[in-house]
Image (cartoon, grey):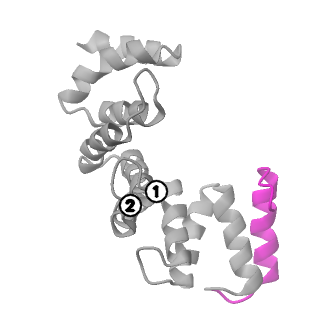
Amino acid sequence: MPDDLEDGSDAYIRKDYKTAFEKWKPLAEQGNPWLQLMIGTMYHAGAGVTQDYREAAKWLRLSAEQGDAGARTTLGVMYHNGHGVTQDYKEAFKWYRLAAEQGDAYAQFNLGQMYDDGHGVTQDSKKAVKWFKLSAEQGNAKAQYNLGFKYEYGEGVAQDFEQAIKWYSEAAEQGYPEA
């Protein structure tokens, strides 16, 4: 079985997703959270298997319940968009929050966006800024742009053009088009 992990990894790197799936699925069934994430991701993308959001959600949930931040974030996205599960902003928020608290920059951005939009939570610009800042500090260009906007217009923070320029500039350096 250890060879299956390595063989699956080698196949995945070669973009032989069908072989990777065949090697990894039995290990994922034994409870490996990283491989459950990978199997879920493969179902989500249709890589080596027929795309199946329901099956993706099943595998991602198994991994997320074991604490994998990437699985938690992706499961949050699925609930946010209603892919393979019934759309549910509160459930999306739950999974984003768990991943964000683990330091996942994408989940932090999504959590900030939910607070900004009031989806699944009461709209709160201060909390949006908190999560955008955590994500922006990790290099997330969208969060940097949003943080620049918040500082420019004084939403959730005191208006501060220097901070706005700082965050817009960081987003622009990464090629973020709106910055």
Q: Residue at (43%, 20%) from the top-left corner? A: 48
Above or below, 59 relative to 162: above
Q: Residue at (39%, 17%) from the top-left corner? A: 20
User: How many numbered marks does the figure carry?
Assistant: 2
Instruction: Identify which residue, 131 or 50, lies in the foreground.
Output: 50
Q: Secondary structure at mark 2?
A: loop
Q: Amino acid at mark 1?
A: Asn
Instruction: Identify which residue, 162 or 143, lies in the foreground.
Output: 143
Q: Residue at (40%, 23%) from the top-left corner? A: 49
Q: Amino acid at mark 2?
A: Gln
Report if residue 52 lies within the magenta region.
no
Give the image location of residue 131, x and y in percent. 53, 70
Task: Quickly name the residue at label 2.
Answer: 87
Sequence order check: which comes first, mark 2 or mark 1?
Answer: 1
Above or below, 16 relative to 54: above
Above or below, 97 relative to 17: below
- Which stretch did the figure color magenta? 157-179
Spatial distance from mark 2 to mark 1, Cα to Cα?
Answer: 6 Å
Q: Residue at (51%, 79%) from the top-left corner? A: 127
Task: Quickly name the residue at label 1.
Answer: 81
Q: Is residue 63 left or right of residue 156?
A: left
Give the image location of residue 159, x and y in percent. 74, 88
Q: Marks 1 and 2: in contact by CB < 8 Å?
A: yes
Q: Is residue 57 left or right of residue 46?
A: left
